[in-house]
Image: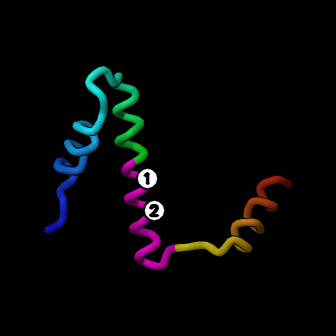
Amino acid sequence: MPVTAKEKMTEVIQSQPDDASYDEILRELAFERMVDRGMSDFRNGHVVTNEEMEHRIRTWQK
């Protein structure tokens, strides 16, 4: 059964130390969301080869 967003957020928050700041908890939640989005992109084939990324970065540097 898939985990709901609320359940995942609760899990991340509960894993933080009791003295974690609001900003630290928000960073952890944002990081978890980025990882989830990246894994979803990977599963759906939305990936870029290293060569393509190198090309893109070179165009940014001009």
Q: Which residue is labeled 1 in the image?
A: 34
Disc 1, disc 2: CB below 8 Å? yes
Q: Residue at x 38, y 49 (%)?
A: 32
Res 44 → quadrant: bottom left
Which amino acid type corresponds to the residue marked 1 in the rendered image? Met
- Decide which of 11, 29 is in the foreground and name it: 11
| Picture disc at residue 4 | none
Residue 6 percent location from the top left of the image: 18, 48
Q: CA distance from mark 1 to mark 2?
A: 6 Å
Q: Which residue is labeled 2 in the image?
A: 38
Spot the residue most to the right.
62
User: Where does the magenta region start and end?
Assistant: 32-46
Instruction: Please give left or right for residue 18 compared with residue 42 in the image.
Output: left
- Decide which of 42, 18 is in the foreground and name it: 18
Rendered view: 42 above or below 20: below
Residue 2 percent location from the top left of the image: 18, 65
Image quarter of the C terminus: bottom right
Q: Residue at x 55, y 73 (%)?
A: 47
Image quarter of the N terminus: bottom left
Which amino acid type corresponds to the residue marked 2 in the rendered image? Gly
Residue 40 percent location from the top left of the image: 39, 68
- Is 7 one of the magenta-colored residues? no
Q: Residue at x 45, y 62 (%)?
A: 38
Instruction: Please give left or right for residue 8 compared with residue 38 in the image.
Output: left
Residue 4 percent location from the top left of the image: 17, 56
